[in-house]
Image (tube, grey):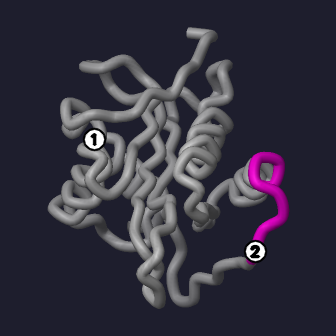
Amino acid sequence: MTDIEVRAGTPDDIHPMITLALAACAENGLTNPNPIKLLSEIWVALTRERGIVGIIGEPGKPIEAAILLRIEPLWYSDEPSIIERAIFVHPDFRAAKGGRASKLCDFAKNVQEQLAFPLLIGVLSSQRTEAKVRLYERKFGDAAGAYWIVGASTGTT
């Protein structure tokens, strides 16, 4: 597959999305996942009630990569923002041609341009962090801060 496209997820994608989300949590989670919470976060985006999911992969097949974007106000405001909850490329597709992570970043930028809400997106990871930050800097420009994890590390759940 050389012509990689990101499509908007639909409710039919719920089962492969949960499978991908659990794989993402197993690899990069800070704490153990709650499948019910994952379901509720993903479902409202797949139904476009309060978000959107960008998916790489054919409907009815395992998902190669996805980005979960939620639309909600920040804790101190009533105005909506686009908040990236997760971006994950399945390990089987990281070395494959097509730039899946880059395409998912482009999807997020397109959503931001269409909705004209601020996009909050970042890297919260203890593994391969430098490469992820370089990709985000190429796609989004300079960072607006940083995260520190004290007393834990991602990918150890």
- Residue 58, above or below 124: above
Q: Decide which of tag 2 and tag 1 comes sooner along the chain.
A: 1
Is residue 2 rendered magenta in the image?
no
Tag shown at residue 63: none
Q: Secondary structure at mark 1?
A: helix
- Of the 4 image quadrants, the one containing the C terminus is bottom left
Left or right relative to 105: residue 90: left
Residue 145, percent across and down?
Answer: 74, 78
- Of the 4 image quadrants, the one containing the N terminus is top right
Choose top left, top right, bottom left or bottom right for residue 142. bottom right
Residue that appears at 54% across and 27% down = 93
Is residue 140 rendered magenta in the image?
yes
Residue 156, percent across and down?
Answer: 45, 67
Tag shown at residue 19: 1
Residue that appears at 60% across and 31% down = 100
Farthest residue toward the left?
A: 36
Judging by the rendered image, the residue that carries numbered circle 2 is: 144
Disc 2 versus disc 1: nearer the observer: 2
Q: Residues within 10 Å of mark 2 (few under 14, many from 20)?
A: few
Q: Secondary structure at mark 2?
A: loop
Instruction: State the separation of the CA atoms marked 2 and 1.
Output: 32 Å
Residue 103, percent across and down?
Answer: 63, 33
Residue that appears at 35% across and 41% down = 20
The residue segment tinted magenta is 137-144
